[in-house]
C-alpha cells in the first residue's frame, strides 16, 4: 500500500512504462486530481478539464514521481473527468 501523504503537488505521474500521464494538482479523497495542462481541449471547443486517477492505480512513489501500475496508454483509459 502506498503512503498517499507522499504524493506531492506538481509531481509527475508516469505509467509503468515511464510514459508521462499527467501532473498532480492534489489528492482528493481516493483519487489524484491531475492539472488541466495535461488535458487536451475538448472537441466542442471547451477548455481543458481536470482528470482523476484512482489511488488504487499507484504502484510506487519514487524520486518525486508517482508511478502507476498500468502503462501510460492504459492509465488514460481509467481517467475520470470532473
Image: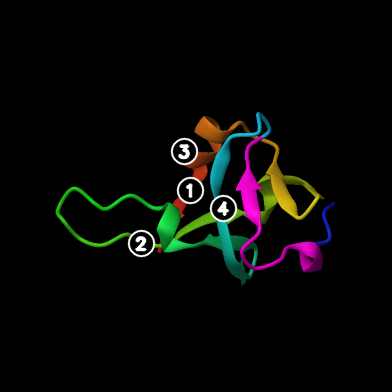
**Label 1 SS:** loop
From the viewer's perspective, is residue 12 above or below residue 67? below
**Label 4 SS:** strand
Crowding around mark 3 (Cα neighbors within 10 Å: few <14, some 14 to 19, many 20+) is few
From the viewer's perspective, is residue 18 above or below residue 62? above
**N-term mark: 2 or 3:** 2
Look at mark 1 in the image and give the residue it sits on. 79
Crowding around mark 1 (Cα neighbors within 10 Å: few <14, some 14 to 19, many 20+) is some
Res. 77 mark: 3
Distance in Å between CA atoms under marks 3 and 1: 6 Å
Membership of 44 in magenta stretch:
no
Q: Residue at x 65, y 33 (%)?
A: 18
Q: Nearer the viewer, residue 32 or 62?
A: 62
Q: Nearer the viewer, residue 35 or 63?
A: 63
Q: Residue at x 40, y 64 (%)?
A: 82
Look at mark 2 in the image and give the residue it sits on. 49
Q: Which quadrant of the figure has residue 81?
A: bottom left
From the viewer's perspective, is residue 16 above or below residue 28? above
Residue 43 position, x and y percent, is 18, 48
Distance in Å between CA atoms under marks 3 and 4: 10 Å
The range drawn in magenta is 4-15
Distance in Å between CA atoms under marks 2 and 4: 13 Å
**Label 3 SS:** helix
Residue 59 position, x and y percent, is 76, 43
Look at mark 4 in the image and give the residue it sits on. 53
**N-term mark: 3 or 4:** 4
Q: Which quadrant of the figure has residue 5?
A: bottom right
Q: Are marks 3 and 4 in contact (CB under 8 Å)?
A: no
**N-term mark: 2 or 1:** 2
Report the side of 78 relative to 69 (left or right): left
**N-term mark: 1 or 4:** 4
Q: Are marks 1 and 4 in contact (CB under 8 Å)?
A: yes
Amino acid at each position: 500500500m502506498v503512503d498517499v501523504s507522499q504524493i506531492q503537488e506538481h509531481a509527475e505521474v508516469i505509467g509503468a512504462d515511464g510514459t508521462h500521464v499527467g501532473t498532480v494538482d492534489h489528492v482528493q479523497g481516493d483519487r489524484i486530481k491531475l492539472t488541466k495542462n495535461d488535458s487536451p481541449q475538448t472537441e466542442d471547443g471547451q477548455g481543458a478539464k481536470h482528470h482523476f486517477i484512482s489511488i488504487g492505480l499507484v504502484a510506487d512513489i519514487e524520486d518525486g514521481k508517482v508511478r502507476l501500475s498500468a502503462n501510460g496508454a492504459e492509465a488514460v483509459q481509467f481517467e475520470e473527468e470532473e
